[in-house]
């Protein structure tokens, strides 16, 4: 019985070991296998979202163009934001692209490309609320603090770190407020429209799109932060980083990336 138990234990350990990739795939291996595995969180229009089974958005078109550049197929895995990052750090996906801000904290476990997009954090409030007339970021933050506001955000994003404070992001936090996290931005903005929270902090581009789809909310003009979006890969996967950087540079130089951005911002303005 003891030998049998030992055998089963060792067999179980072997299954666990072989169930996870022990190392990342460089560019040559990705091309040899013929597939680029991409982790995303398709709840962040206009950067990534789904219509039926089709993946759309700025990030999705960028990474699909990269797969075409490598002459490989693309396998997109739609995960929650934390899981998308974990999928890359554990070598289950080759890249993660999901409006990911590059910072010191994330660089401890992941490698990143150069920035491909500069984004800003903004505040959404209910139309006609006591915050609506505020025109400066300092006024907004003071008002949120003074009213002990409940502020919503997408979990594990810059919005959460801004509200709660984070050393690696160099955010002090908003005192006397409560941070209410949601699986995605749409749920946070819906909660705001329903009066369950007082404000939402999220990236400017999706904020403006939510305001067109969800009645009764508005974006305040001041921006709170500026941050750089980058593509995440496994720590130390330098060949993939270099390849992606060359591709991003090429897309910017030939105007193709600008065309992708304009396509989705054009849809937003309709």
Image: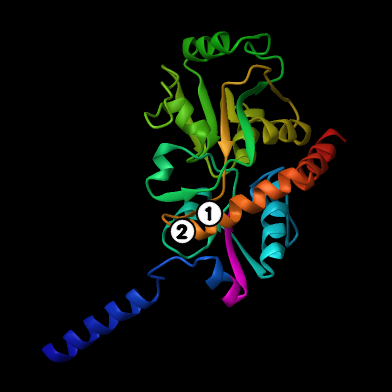
Question: Is residue 61 positioned above or below 29 on the image?
Answer: above
Q: Is residue 106 left or right of residue 141?
A: left
SS at circle 1: helix
Q: Nearer the viewer, residue 265 or 51?
A: 265
The answer to whether residue 79 shows anywhere in this view is no
Query: Residue tagged by mark 2?
Result: 237
Residue shown at the point (67%, 63%) measured from the top left: 67
Image coloring type: rainbow
Q: Quadrant of the N terminus?
A: bottom left
Residue furthest to the right in view is 270
* Label 2 crowd bin: few (<14), some (14–19), many (20+), radius 10 Å: some
Q: Is residue 145 left or right of residue 140?
A: left
Place of residue 241 in the rendered image (x, y in percent of width and height, measured from the top left) = 53, 54
Q: Nearer the viewer, residue 27 or 121?
A: 27
Q: Nearer the viewer, residue 227 or 192?
A: 227
- Number of marks: 2
Place of residue 264 in the rendered image (x, y in percent of width and height, measured from the top left) = 79, 42
Place of residue 113 in the rendered image (x, y in percent of width and height, measured from the top left) = 54, 47
Quarter-of-image position of residue 52: bottom right
Residue shown at the point (64%, 47%) measured from the top left: 43
Q: Quadrant of the C terminus?
A: top right
Q: Is residue 226 left or right of residue 22?
A: right
Quarter-of-image position of residue 228: top right
Residue 71 among those drawn in magenta: no
Q: Which residues are magenta?
A: 31-41
Q: Which mark is residue 241?
A: 1
**Circles 2 and 1 in contact, beta carbons < 8 Å:** yes
């Amino acid at each position: 019985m003891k030998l049998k138990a030992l055998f089963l234990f060792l067999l179980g350990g072997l299954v666990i070991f072989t169930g996870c990739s022990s190392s990342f795939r460089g560019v040559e291996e990705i091309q040899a296998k013929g597939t680029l595995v991409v982790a995303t969180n398709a709840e962040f229009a206009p950067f990534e979202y789904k219509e039926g089974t089709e993946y759309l958005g700025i990030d999705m078109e960028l990474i699909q163009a990269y797969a075409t550049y490598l002459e490989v197929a693309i396998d997109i895995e739609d995960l929650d934001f934390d899981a998308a990052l974990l999928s890359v750090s554990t070598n289950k996906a080759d890249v993660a692209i999901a409006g990911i801000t590059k910072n010191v904290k994330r660089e401890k476990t992941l490698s990143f490309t150069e920035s491909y997009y500069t984004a800003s954090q903004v505040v959404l409030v209910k139309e006609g609320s006591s915050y609506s007339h505020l025109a400066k970021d300092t006024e907004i933050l003071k008002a949120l603090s003074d009213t002990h506001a409940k502020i919503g955000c997408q979990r594990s994003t810059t919005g959460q770190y801004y509200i709660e404070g984070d050393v690696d992001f160099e955010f002090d936090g908003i005192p006397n407020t409560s941070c209410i996290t949601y699986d995605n931005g749409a749920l946070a903005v819906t909660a705001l429209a329903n009066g369950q929270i007082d404000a939402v902090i999220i990236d400017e581009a999706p904020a403006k799109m939510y305001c067109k789809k969800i009645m009764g909310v508005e974006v305040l003009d001041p921006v709170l932060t500026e941050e750089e979006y980058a593509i995440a890969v496994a720590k130390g996967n330098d060949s993939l980083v270099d390849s992606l950087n060359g591709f991003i540079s090429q897309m910017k130089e030939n105007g193709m990336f600008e065309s992708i951005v304009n396509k989705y911002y054009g849809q937003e303005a309709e």
